[in-house]
Image (cartoon, helix red, strand yellow):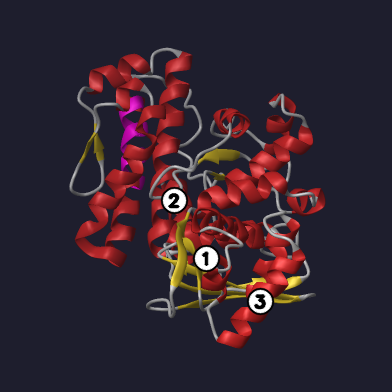
Amino acid sequence: MDDFVSRGDLAHIPFARVLAGIGRQGLTGLLLVRGVGGEKKFSFDRGALVLGSATFDEAGFLKFLWTRGEADLIGLARVEDLARRAGTPLLRALTEEGLLAPARLWPALESFAEDEACSLFDREDAEFEFQALPGLAGRTFVGGIDVAGLVLEGVRKMTNAALIAGHLPAEGEPLRRLQAGWPERPRLSLQERYLLGLLEPGTTVAELYAESDLGKEDTQRALFALLCLGLAGTTAPRPKTGRLPADRSPAETERLFAAFNNKCSFIFKSISKGVGPVALSIIEKSIDEIKGRLDPVFQGLELKPDGRIELRSSLKLNMAMGGEEGRRSLLRSMDEILMAEVLAVKRTLGPAHEAALVRGLERLGDAS
């Protein structure tokens, strides 16, 4: 997923992606959405949606209560008039007049906040701006509304299929699963988990459509949700380990592994320049995230202080390279490791550093 953008228009950056960016970054502040029908304001505290006095739309909430059948128009008008004449806060007037008990009122407030957000998922005719703040002003009525869950619910309810399709990668693009970085893993539905399971490294969008049993429209919807949440993404420019060599001798195996390690060391040096001593832990984390998908030979790998990878037994490496399938498995694992490390550079230092790194790796590959 791209770095969070604080302002733009919903035609280019869908509301689902805007919300997910705020949640993943753990941001605090106000999100303003301006378009036909006026402006909507949303408060966020450390990445969670908050309904507070600073952004509470009282008129909108009264309309919500009526349309949901929580109260009749006469009772709502009476409470609104009382609150205005007596200077009583609206929520207090609702409970004191006996129109809504707190046990019903607070769940309604939470539903209202979620409904206001979900109403924007299909929109393309509005602009947004996020204003980062050190803290939120006013009182909090409902806090801690899960943004990841809200994104999933909003996408599931979307009717603008053209918006969804327009923000998916081209059919020839390869996909992969990603570690999104949410504090708690988003609660996917059974069909969303099914689709995520189909995303083997290198699976193209067209292949996903052909393989999925959900049907194309629901496949696109689920894929859109996974992409917005950062649980799936397109494959980064692939720093190749090299073509399968004709020479399958132990010497050639060692040469291939040495070329791979040169690239690992090159990536480590690149990230070290930007972050210093924590570079090794960043690389370690990137490898840990994919270790379960790697060839068994790499399960006991050790990361050296210069970023190179050492296996417990080079004999195992040579034996694994003896068969065609074993060779392919090892080469895929080497590519997986390099791509994970390149992604770590993007997450830590940004897309510009990633692009420069990939160019450097390509030059290194040409020279090897």
* Figure check: 261 above or below 114: above
Q: Mark 3–mark 1 contact, CB under 8 Å? A: no
- Percent across and percent down for residue 154 are 65, 51
> Residue 80's mark?
3
217 left or right of 243 in image: right
Can see residue 172?
A: no
Residue 177 among magenta residues: no
Asked which secondary structure carries label 2, the reply is helix
| Amino acid type at image mark 2 | Leu
Q: Nearer the viewer, residue 312 or 157?
A: 157
Q: Nearer the viewer, residue 324 or 175?
A: 175
Mark pair 3, 1: CA separation: 40 Å
Please report the bounds of the magenta region as a residue range: 253-263
Q: Mark 1–mark 2 contact, CB under 8 Å? A: no
- Percent across and percent down for residue 242 are 47, 36
| Amino acid type at image mark 1 | Phe
Could you classify mark 2 by the number of other residues whose Cα lies within 10 Å: few (under 14), some (14-19), or many (20 or more)?
many
